[in-house]
């Protein structure tokens, strides 16, 4: 269970900053007013943070890859590089393709929920 509160050392966690406890400790903290259950907004912020962190790590992997590795990865994932040959252009094409796929997935999920 995740709760939000002030740590024992006095560090105050802001909304959206999770601190994990076992369920019993989280319930105890919530019961004494030292923590609260995360809200939907907290969960959305945490999910956005996790996505942003994963994207930053993925981007670092792209930056560390060679041109040949980038081209091979693009081919494996059906990404058209549109004739790009420079590393920066290849990365830009890959990022644009992945962003477009993510946007399509979000739109499809939104349509399915209607």
Image (cartoon, rainbow, N blue to C red):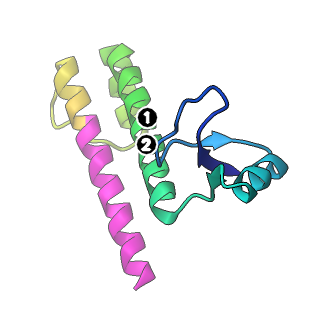
Q: Which residues are magenta?
A: 94-114
Label number found at residue 67: none
Q: Main secondary structure of the magenta part?
A: helix
Q: Say if the magenta span includes residue 81.
A: no
Q: Residue furthest bottom?
A: 114
Residue 53: x and y, percent?
43, 34
Q: Residue at x 52, y 39 (%)?
A: 13
Q: Which residue occupies 53% across, 62% down?
A: 39
Q: Give the residue number, with chain letter if any, for mark 2.
A: 49
Q: Nearer the viewer, residue 2 or 35?
A: 35
Callout 2 environment at 10 Å: few (<14), some (14 to 19), or many (20+)? some
Crowdedness of circle 1 by 10 Å Cα count: few (<14), some, many (20+)? few
44 relative to 49, above or below: below
Name the image quarter holding residue 74: top left
- How far across and how far down the image is residue 21, in percent? 74, 42
Q: Which element type, helix, strand or loop, lies under badge 1?
A: helix
- In screen coordinates, is 11 left or right of 25? left
Image quadrant holding the C terminus, namely bottom left
What numbered label is drawn on residue 53? 1
**Label 2, label 1: how far apart the Cα atoms are:** 6 Å
Residue 3 horizontal side relative to residue 54, left or right: right
| 68 w.r.t. 40: above or below | above
Q: Is there CB contact under 8 Å for labels 2 and 1?
A: yes
State the residue at coordinates (27%, 52%): 100
**Most distant residue in the right direction:** 24
| Quarter of image, res 71 | top left
Identify the residue shown where x is 35% and y is 28%: 59
Q: Secondary structure at mark 2?
A: helix
């Amino acid at each position: 269970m995740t709760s939000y509160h002030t740590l024992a050392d006095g560090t105050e966690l802001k909304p959206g900053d999770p601190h994990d406890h076992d369920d019993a400790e989280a319930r105890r903290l919530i019961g004494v007013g030292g923590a609260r259950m995360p809200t939907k907004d907290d969960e959305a912020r945490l999910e956005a943070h996790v996505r942003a962190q994963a994207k930053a790590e993925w981007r670092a992997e792209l930056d560390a890859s060679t041109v040949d590795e980038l081209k091979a990865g693009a081919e494996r994932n059906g990404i058209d590089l549109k004739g790009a040959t420079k590393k920066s252009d290849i990365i830009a094409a890959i990022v644009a393709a992945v962003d477009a796929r993510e946007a399509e997935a979000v739109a499809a999920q939104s349509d399915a929920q209607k």
